[in-house]
Amino acid sequence: MGSLGWAVCLSLLSVGAYATAAVAQERLAEHDHRGLSRWAVALLLTGAGVVLHVLALNFGTVAVVQALGTLTLLVALPIEVIRYHTPISRTAWLHAGLTVGGLIVILSLSVESEDSAVLAESTVRTLAWVTAGVVVACSGAAWRAGPTARAMLLAGAAGTAHGIGSVMAKAVLASFTTGGAGAVSVTAAMLVVAFAVAGYLLGQLAYRGAGLAAPLATVSVTNPLVAAFAGVVLFDEGVRFGPVGLAAAGVAAVVMGWGVVGLARRTAGSGSRGESGGASPLERAEAE
């Protein structure tokens, strides 16, 4: 099995772990967050999802791995049927088909650079400052905006932090695999944690006061788009067939984005019926 195959398999396992962790978190919430075994299961599954996601980044492009992460929304469909006996509408099937179809095209066109994904220390610092600037600018603008715009700006900041965090994680793993622990940039490793925490906190703030659909859709689209752009710029990731392939990948990204937004709105609607406030476990898992 080639690198792309490993990336897909590990990403799908990560999605499964996140989705299963979401169910465990939901059951934990139903028991008022009591029970050591429930906490342990939820944490172990979430940790497994994170590890599998990072390992997938070592085998595939950032764009592919982050795009595959949006399939958590797709996994929500059978979970809702089993847990809540909620029927899957034709619109939901359409959005699922658009998501999978767009993803298949992106996977078939994706080409990883032959160069190492190691980033120089100066590049790591520059990327950190640029990302921090974007996150701070979006967060600052959010406090002056209305509820919906505020939620989307905070979700955009969260998606940016998560996307760049994955880019940093790929660089850290590349350094480790090529030069051992001594070659890993401490700055980059710390930034992976910092962006992950920032993305999580901003995502939680985005879900307050403006419903769930808009912020969930925003973070679901922003995350892979930011990661894909950074992968092209920093790692020289690209697509097959030159300009034609690039145009096809762009169309596929739009189609997939349409499907992801539709699935996000459906998941948000289902989550709001099941919970009185905040993001549902499946939504939190998807954002990670």
Image: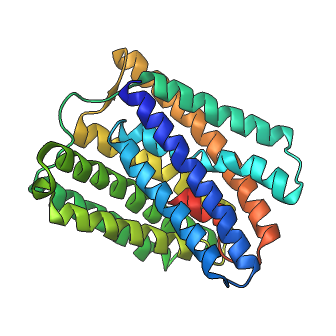
The answer to whether one can see residue 154 in this image is yes
Quadrant (top left/top right/bottom left/bottom right) for the N terminus: top left
Which residue appears at 40% of the width and 72% of the height?
Answer: 198
| Image quadrant assignment for residue 204 | bottom right
203 lies left or right of 132: right
247 lies left or right of 209: left
Residue 147 image point, x, y percent? 62, 74
Residue 229 image point, x, y percent? 35, 42
Q: Considering only vertical position in the picture, is 14 above or below 282?
A: above
Residue 71 image point, x, y percent? 60, 44
Which residue appears at 32% of the width and 70% of the height?
Answer: 194
| Image quadrant assignment for residue 140 | bottom left
Q: Considering only vertical position in the picture, is 106 above or below 233?
A: above
Q: Nearer the viewer, residue 156 or 105?
A: 105
The answer to whether one can see residue 228 in this image is no
Q: Considering only vertical position in the picture, is 250 above or below 77?
A: above
Residue 123 image point, x, y percent? 14, 53
Tell me the colour scheme of the image. rainbow
